[in-house]
Structures are given as C-alpha cells and as structure tokens.
Amino acid sequence: MKLSRFETLTTRVTLLGLGLLWLFAGPQAAAAAVQEVTLFPHSALIVETAKYAVQGSADAHQAVFTLPAQADPETLVTKTTPGAGWRIEDQSWRQINRQDEEGIRVLKAKIAKLKEERGFLQASQQGIDTQIQFWQNQAKAKTKTLAEAVNLAAAIGKNSRRVFQEKVQLEPQMEKIDREIALAQEELKRAAGSQETAWEVTVLLGGRGPAELSLNYSYVLNGCGWLPLYRIEARPREQRIFLAWDAEVWQSSGTDWIETRVNIATLQPPRSLTPPEFRPWIIQPRPTYRPMVQRKAARADALQLLEEATNEAVGVMAAPVPETKSTFTLWSLGKRTIPAGPKRKFSIREEFWPAAFTYLLRPSVSNQAFVRAEVTLAEPRDIPSGSGQFVIDGAVLGKREFAFSGREGEIYFGVDPLVSARAELLQRQSGEKGFIADRRTQIWDWRLEVQNDRTIPVRIRLEEPNPQVRDERIRFKTVLDPDTTEKNPETLIWSFELPAGAKKSLQTTYQLDAPKDMNLDTGWR
C-alpha cells in the first residue's frame, strides 16, 4: 500500500521523535536488588547490586543511583565488579524528591478511596441531622384540631424513629472507616518511612569499560530492625527448660526485600572500637595551682566492622546458624522475604537446656517459694534482652524481660503456691548479767517450717540473714539445728530434699551480750 505524502512525513516525524526520546533517555538501569541484609536492633546493613548506564563524555564518566531516605550516605561503600574496566574515583550525594513506588502508590490510593467513602458517609450523616432538626421543629407547629395534632405527632414519631435508626446505622460505618484510614496511614508511614525524599548518589568513574556498569554497594539503613521474642518453659519433672526464640523484624525502605539473605545481629556494633584512655595516677605534693589535663579518646568508625560482618558469604540454611563476631553474634536466617511496612516473625532457635530446679525460701520476709532454675550449658550463649513469656508445667506466668549470656545462670519462674515456709518466734528474752550488772543480754529463738504439698519431691534452698556484729564489745552466738550446709557473712543457707507431702522444721537461736550503757540497734528482727 502506497502512503500519501502527508502520511510519509508524519511517519518520519514520529520515528525521529522516538529516536530522540531514546537518545536522551539513554539505556535504563535495572532495579537494584537487595542481596543481603544484616539487621541490628535499630538499623540494618544493606548489600545491593545493580547495573547502571555509564553517562558523560569521553573525558568524564559517571553512574547515578538512588538510596532510600532512611539510608545514611556517610556509610556508603561502593565497588565495581572485578575486570569491569572502570574504577571509582569519587562519589557524592544529594537529597531529591522520593519516587513514588508501586506499594506506596497503592496505599495512597487506598487512603484516598477511604476518605472519599468517609466523605459520602459524612454527607449522609449531615442530611440525617437536617431531617432530625426538621421533624423536631414540626413539634412546635400549631394545629387547629385534635385530629391534626394526632396525625402530626404520629408523623413526627414515625419519621424521627426512621432518621434516628439511619443515624445509628451510620455511626459504626464511620468508626470502621476511621479505623481503616488510621491503619492505612500507619502502614504508609512504615512503608515510606514518613519521608518523601531519597538520596541520589553520583559515582565518578575513571578508566575505560562497557556502557553498562555493575555496582556492588553497602550502606546503613535506619527505620528498620528487629526485636527478640522468647518463650521460656520450665519443666521441673524433666529437669530442663524449653527455650523458643523468635525474631520480629520490620523495615520501612519503601521496597520489599524479595528472597534476600537475612542475618540478625544480637547487638548494635559500637561506634567507638578503642578503649578510653585514663589519666595517670600521680601522687605528689599538691601544687599551688592545678593544671587542666585534657585527653581525647581515639575513636574509630564501625563501618569496617559492619562490612566484615556481611562480606563473608552466607548460604541458604534450613535453620538459623550463629556466627560469633568480636562484639556480637550473627544469626543467618537464610533467604527470606520481608515486605516494607508490616512486621514479620521468624523462628531463630528452639532448644532444651538442662537445669537444676530449686525452691528458694526466705521465711523471715515471706512464706512464698520461688522456683529457681540453675542452668549449666556445654557452650556459651549470647541471648539479647527481649520480651519473654514465662511458663511452668504448661501454666503461663506472665511476661518480663529475659536475657542470658555465658554458660551458667539462674532463671526464676515465679512463686509455687504448693511449697511454703513460715517463721515462728518461740521466745525473745532480754536481761542483765554480771556482778554489778554492767552488761545486758538478749535471746531470739525461731522455728522455721517448710511444707511441700506437691506430689513430687522438691529441692529446697532455705535462706536466712546471718547477723553481722559491727562492734568488738558485742559478743554474739548462733545455735542452729540442723547446721547450715553453706554460710557466708550475710546469709545462712540450708539445702535439702523435701519429699512429696512432707514437712521439715529447723530451729535457730541467737544470743547477744553487750555493754549495758550501749545505745544498741538490734536491726529489723
């Protein structure tokens, strides 16, 4: 088919326009792919790779890419792939308006639609309020006959009921719309990081290479992190503890991390890696003036430590594996998908710890028995502080902070009401002694009883305060039946096995002898 002269000209102009558009646009860069993420409690180290078009003239070349608004450009480390032909000579960055990613656009459209629905409901509510006001005003109208008054009252009552019912039906819809708007706005805040900007990075290049450059770069990202969650279950019959450790992670980069190698670090690496200096300890005659000595502790950047933590390749693993660093422990979760905005929970570890359970009682201050587990592990653990749910024999005790470090430690599981103790004062006497009664005496006699109402034997640890004499003129004698199994300057300790349903009694007698004229403080007992 032969084209007319006008059609031929139009086609040429169109092709020329498309060619110019392609020329000015240049080759498009592939979207940056997040290769690896190391999550710290309040930030993350991101490792990305992407191909970018090399721009510029024969004498000056550069590549341009963007980072999320929450990124810290000061921590950016950029590298080219080996054998690329290009070398990085310098890099700079500036803040630009944030590109509206698809997920953020969807959330904004959802919020706009919800607000439109709310406006419609609000208009309907205002119309109903107008009807209510109309029918309320009709009650003031004057009628000529009784029949007119009856008909008017019936009409007012009927229509008032109708409009009030409509208003009542609208109120829960308005509340639902308000909740949905608040949730969507919160999700948008997490997804976009409550900012509408990004960092544009320009990398200056030297050397000679292809028109497309592969870059690997890492940076610290704020607005993300993780929290440890624990379930600590005591199983006294089995003499062990079950520990389930989960990680709740989140990120607000505005982009979903799809099938990304994810690590979590137990501690935030310190920004200062060198110990502080101390002032010399000098003993000498005091001068008439004191010179001011100022020392500045050397500081080092933690970026090198962060980079070392993630430069080592971590493969896909079936279960998280710990890797001990110099100041923290790194756990690999394998490849995971973490969307921007909502929080996700991943299992880190489940294990049993051998534990020796004892029931700690201090009858002089309380009759309650506190369940204590003494843990001894073959290998040290680095468990960061987090929210823990404590359970004993299937019964939930509640939540409190939990942390564990090293091989040995004590974990308390609250009060067992089936084990108790009480202290009974048998006698408390005071008197005088000596030829001229220059000294005085005092005696305390206590009975301690421990009761086990459980169906299994329990290990008891009974503790009482050991009197401490702070004056050499005071003579003090302690008689214990039975004697303690352990004693220190502050505490008397008895350890024994108590059979199921059994009771055990102990007796303590304290004898004091002090000068009569001494203003004596015998303490809280």
Image (cartoon, rainbow, N blue to C red):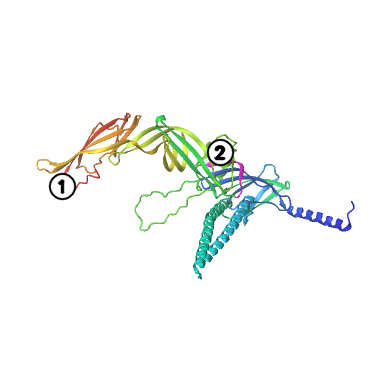
Q: Secondary structure at mark 1?
A: loop
Q: Quadrant of residue 127?
A: bottom right
The spot of residue 182 in percent (x, y) is: 54, 54
Q: Nearer the viewer, residue 390 or 211?
A: 390
Residue drawn where x is 73% and y is 50% of the image: 27
Q: Which residue in the protein does label 1 denote?
A: 517
Q: Secondary structure at mark 2?
A: strand
Of the image marks 2 and 1, the number of the one nearer the N terminus: 2
The spot of residue 87 in percent (x, y) is: 67, 47
- Position of the C terminus by quadrant: top left
Q: Is residue 73 visible?
A: no
Residue sitting at the far right:
2
Residue type for callout 2: Leu
In front of the other: label 2 or label 1?
Answer: 2
Specify the segment rendered in magenta.
254-265
Residue 333, numbered circle: 2
The spot of residue 92 in percent (x, y) is: 63, 54
Dot 2: few (<14), some (14–19), or many (≥20) neighbours within 10 Å?
many
